[in-house]
């Protein structure tokens, strides 16, 4: 199927090329700085795979914010984090080149590093803090670039260029409506600039808002119940969007091994509760029957968070004299977001045996010897009387750069200071206070009454902050007529804090947990670059030395070359070494709690349940930081060929290979279940283990922390075809960018063997974007096709080869969406109408029809958005 799409897209581009023989226009040569190099020089191929997204292409997408534009770029092949409801990172969005993770993709602003989001551990930039209106273009270097930028640039660099030297005034307004619910997305912006004989000032102000998406508003995220085998409803096998945290009571005795869970006596359907459901297949108890009283959290929770953004940007230059210029860049952004969880799901430990909800006859069980006085009685409750948990997060970014640049003789220099601060404040309402629960029980108040809710309701807070202070200096100078060199240094200090309220830190709040943490880091770097422009041959050598006060030093070299074979054909190649410093949150971050889902294969196997029938369930999961983490090291190489054909037709073909050693990651719950099934011994001393009351008992908790284990290698091919010509029917342009992942080799699970998982579940091998434009007179039309190739439908553990390997089966299906827009340029401005996801394609779902964790990274669930916009330039 994917080959058919590729043939159709290439065929369309070739057909456009044959429609006209108009000659290409010659670009004026100017001094530029391209991403991946600090040397300013006349434009020529840089020896690297560089993807340009100009302002016209950004506008063609019809997207509201820049994170939406980058999310659909084919280089983001594995998907990336987008705004999610209900967490402190709910306003955040990222980009992940080559499927290597957003922490291995460096995002810069006008070639300069910014501070990372504290809600993402300061490890990556929140794209939603960047102004859409002020963006001039985006350059993506799809090669490792630590030799220029230092840490994080393992997979490449996304450089977002903001407008400078703008003159005039431009006003823009946009209003969009979603088809699948009542949600809206609106935006208004003003950008202006004024030139003076000694400088320029450019400013932009932008405000936009996008409504949340609730799980109930999409059929594939709303709760459902299906009796798939006609034997009654089995929890988690025949349900989705429901949790056993409803009104379920668990009786366990470690002395006798008695293990049973039953729905509370007050359990009944209605008010969000599903009612009593069979739990034997999921709980695998020692005593039957076992039942849950389940609650439909999906009827309450929001899926995509609401965003309300306002930002301002100023760029100014002033020529002090003919050889010296002052410049400044100021960016201020504020993003307010709203997310919603269902009412708090929290354990009620040490429940009174005589509480009316308890379905067990404790006295009779004691008398029979089935249990001893060592038993525990625990309620798994949904505290609906407290209300849904509402999270309000306000993120504020201030990025300030002031510098001097100039020349003396044939040399140029650039010196600047930069201060980048990101603050995030979160208020979570309607959580459960365990202190309040103790008070209620001591006072004889019904915990599910209004009085009980008033005493038990807790408000949680987080105050998170990231700071970066930087001093930078470089000098560029000619060595010979054909050789240019650059040397420089920078000193950076990073500060990170994550402060929880005391009740959450102390474990007194149900549904919230975390310890406050702090971290600092000082970095000093020296770097150099030499460029040989030898006519048809260009060679670029770079090296950088980084000294970190917390983990040590790193040296990152690179070598790139471009050779012009003919006037229309050039070849290029690049080799580079890169590193990823451990994030401050990974070293010093707080412990965090999450109710993660996974399939406990070892337990199912012990209970005689077929692995293919092992159901997924939620488990109390605790993640912690590791101050002993080391830096990752990587090597990458790429080569390519660029062919310019007659009539303005260009074809670029590239190959890349990236290898990462000393891989740093935090094992997932499912990875640990797979490892245990394979016979891996997980020890408490490592901080990565499954805590079971008995050898194969249901885990009471799962613990995981950061570790350096194994390696990862990926390689692939990029195809970029572009054309554009004037005909008597108007100007036609077309661009196809296709990336094909050839391999993705890493550990199949924690401490497991290495295998290639390209094409496995949610790991598509192909991603493409095809953009066609038409311009004639006052009329503009843009058509954008985004394509994500298929991947495996199910990944399971396979022992048929004698090794615990993953295997994939089935076909998840490919995903193609279309966006179409029309703009008419009139004396009163440019009026436009468009539709994103024109055909209202639903996202790809799994084999059970679920929109599971990981799906939002790849497949957007917004649906069709019809919008109108207007732009007027003075």
Image: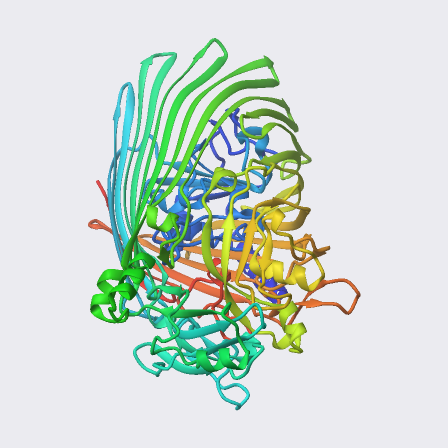
Q: Is residue 795 shown to the viewer in this render?
A: no
- The picture quadrant where one finds residue 759 is bottom right
Outermost residue to the bottom: 230
Residue 199 in the image, given as x and y percentages of width and height = 29, 22
- The picture quadrant where one finds residue 185 is bottom left
- Front residue of this view, candidates 453 and 399: 453
- Front residue of this view, candidates 673 and 104: 673
Quadrant (top left/top right/bottom left/bottom right) for the N terminus? bottom right
Residue 145 in the image, given as x and y percentages of width and height = 58, 34
Residue at horizontal 49 percent and vertical 52 percent from the top: 73
Residue 823 in the image, given as x and y percentages of width and height = 31, 56
- The picture quadrant where one finds residue 249 is bottom left
Q: Is residue 73 shown to the viewer in this render?
A: yes
Residue at horizontal 62 percent and vertical 47 percent from the top: 686
Residue 172 horizontal side relative to residue 229, left or right: left
- How was the colour assigned to the protein in this rendering? rainbow
Image position of 394 with respect to 421: above or below: below
Quadrant (top left/top right/bottom left/bottom right) for the C terminus? top left
Outermost residue to the right: 802
Outermost residue to the front: 367
Image position of 136 with respect to 529: above or below: below
Residue 14 in the image, given as x and y percentages of width and height = 57, 56
Image position of 325 with respect to 461: above or below: above
């Amino acid at each position: 199927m994917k080959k058919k799409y590729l043939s159709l897209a290439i065929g369309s581009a070739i057909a456009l090329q044959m429609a006209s023989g108009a000659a290409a226009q010659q670009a004026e040569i100017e001094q530029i700085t391209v991403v991946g190099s600090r040397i300013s020089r006349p434009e020529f191929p840089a020896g690297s795979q560089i993807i340009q997204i100009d302002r016209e292409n950004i506008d063609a997408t019809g997207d509201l914010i820049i994170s939406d534009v980058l999310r659909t770029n084919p280089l983001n092949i594995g998907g990336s984090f987008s705004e999610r409801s209900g967490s402190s990172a709910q306003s955040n969005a990222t980009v992940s080149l080559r499927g290597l993770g957003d922490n291995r993709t460096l995002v810069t602003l006008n070639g300069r590093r910014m501070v990372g989001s504290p809600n993402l551990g300061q490890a990556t930039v929140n794209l939603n803090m960047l102004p859409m209106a002020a963006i001039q273009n985006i350059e993506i270097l799809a090669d490792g670039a630590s030799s220029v930028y230092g840490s994080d640039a393992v997979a490449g660099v996304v450089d977002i260029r903001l407008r400078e030297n703008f003159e005039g005034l431009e006003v823009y307004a946009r209003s969009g409506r979603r088809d699948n619910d009542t949600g809206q997305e609106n935006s208004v912006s003003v950008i202006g600039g004024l030139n003076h004989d000694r400088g320029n000032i450019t400013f932009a102000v932008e405000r936009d808002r996008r409504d949340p998406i609730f799980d109930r508003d999409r059929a594939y995220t709303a709760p459902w119940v299906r009796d798939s085998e006609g034997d009654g409803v089995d929890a988690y096998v025949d349900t989705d969007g429901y949790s056993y945290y409803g009104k379920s009571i668990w009786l366990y005795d470690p002395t006798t091994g008695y293990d049973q869970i039953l729905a509370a006596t007050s359990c009944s359907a209605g008010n969000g509760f599903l009612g009593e459901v069979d739990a034997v297949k999921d709980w695998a108890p020692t005593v039957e029957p076992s039942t849950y009283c389940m609650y439909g959290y999906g009827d309450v929770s929001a899926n995509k968070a609401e965003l309300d953004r306002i930002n301002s940007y100023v760029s100014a230059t002033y020529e002090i004299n003919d050889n010296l210029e002052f410049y400044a860049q100021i960016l201020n952004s504020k993003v307010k977001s709203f997310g919603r969880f269902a009412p708090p799901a929290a354990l009620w430990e040490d429940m009174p045996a005589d509480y009316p909800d308890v379905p067990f006859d404790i006295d009779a069980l004691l008398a029979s010897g089935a249990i001893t006085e060592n038993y525990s009685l625990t309620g798994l409750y949904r505290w609906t009387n407290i209300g849904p948990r509402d999270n309000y997060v306000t993120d504020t970014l201030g990025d300030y750069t002031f510098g001097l640049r100039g020349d003396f003789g044939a040399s140029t220099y650039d010196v600047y200071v930069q201060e980048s601060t990101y603050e995030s404040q979160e208020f979570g309402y309607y959580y459960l206070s365990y202190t309040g629960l103790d008070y209620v029980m001591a006072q004889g108040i019904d915990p599910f009454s209004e009085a009980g809710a008033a005493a038990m309701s807790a408000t949680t807070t987080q105050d998170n902050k990231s700071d970066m202070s930087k001093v930078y200096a470089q000098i560029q100078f000619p060595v010979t007529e054909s050789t240019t060199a650059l040397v420089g240094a920078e000193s950076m200090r990073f500060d990170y804090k994550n402060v929880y309220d005391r009740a959450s830190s102390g474990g007194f709040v149900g549904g919230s947990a975390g310890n406050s943490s702090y971290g600092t880091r000082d970095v000093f770097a020296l770097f150099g670059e030499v460029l040989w422009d030898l006519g048809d041959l260009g060679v670029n050598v770079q090296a950088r030395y980084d000294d970190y006060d917390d983990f040590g030093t790193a040296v990152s070299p690179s070598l790139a070359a471009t050779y012009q074979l003919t006037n229309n054909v050039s070849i290029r190649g690049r080799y580079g070494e890169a590193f990823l410093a451990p994030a401050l949150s990974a070293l010093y971050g707080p412990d965090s709690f999450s109710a993660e889902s996974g399939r406990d294969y070892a337990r199912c196997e012990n209970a005689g349940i077929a692995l293919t029938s092992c159901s997924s369930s939620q488990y109390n999961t605790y993640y912690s930081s590791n101050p002993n983490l080391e830096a990752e090291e990587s090597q990458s190489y790429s080569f390519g060929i660029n062919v310019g054909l007659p009539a303005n037709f260009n074809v670029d073909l590239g190959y890349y290979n990236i290898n990462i050693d000393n891989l740093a990651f935090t094992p997932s719950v499912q990875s640990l279940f797979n490892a245990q099934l394979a016979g891996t011994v997980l020890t408490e001393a490592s901080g990565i283990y499954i805590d079971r009351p008995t050898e194969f008992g249901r885990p009471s908790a799962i613990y995981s922390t950061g570790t350096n284990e194994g390696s990862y290698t990926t390689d692939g091919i990029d195809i970029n075809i572009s054309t554009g010509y004037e005909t008597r029917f108007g100007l036609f342009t077309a661009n196809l960018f296709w990336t094909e992942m050839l391999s993705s080799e890493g550990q199949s699970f924690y401490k497991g063997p290495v295998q290639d998982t390209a094409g496995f579940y949610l790991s598509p091998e192909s991603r493409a974007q095809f953009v066609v434009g038409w311009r004639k007179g006052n009329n503009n039309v843009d058509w954008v096709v985004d394509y994500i190739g298929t991947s495996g439908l199910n990944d399971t553990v396979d022992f048929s080869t004698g090794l615990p390997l993953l295997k994939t089966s089935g076909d998840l299906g490919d995903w193609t969406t279309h966006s179409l827009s029309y703009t008419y340029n009139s004396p009163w401005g440019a009026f436009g109408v468009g539709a994103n996801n024109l055909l209202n394609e639903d996202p790809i779902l799994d084999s059970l029809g679920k929109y599971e964790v990981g799906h939002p990274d790849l497949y957007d669930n917004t649906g069709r958005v019809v919008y109108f916009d207007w732009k007027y330039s003075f």
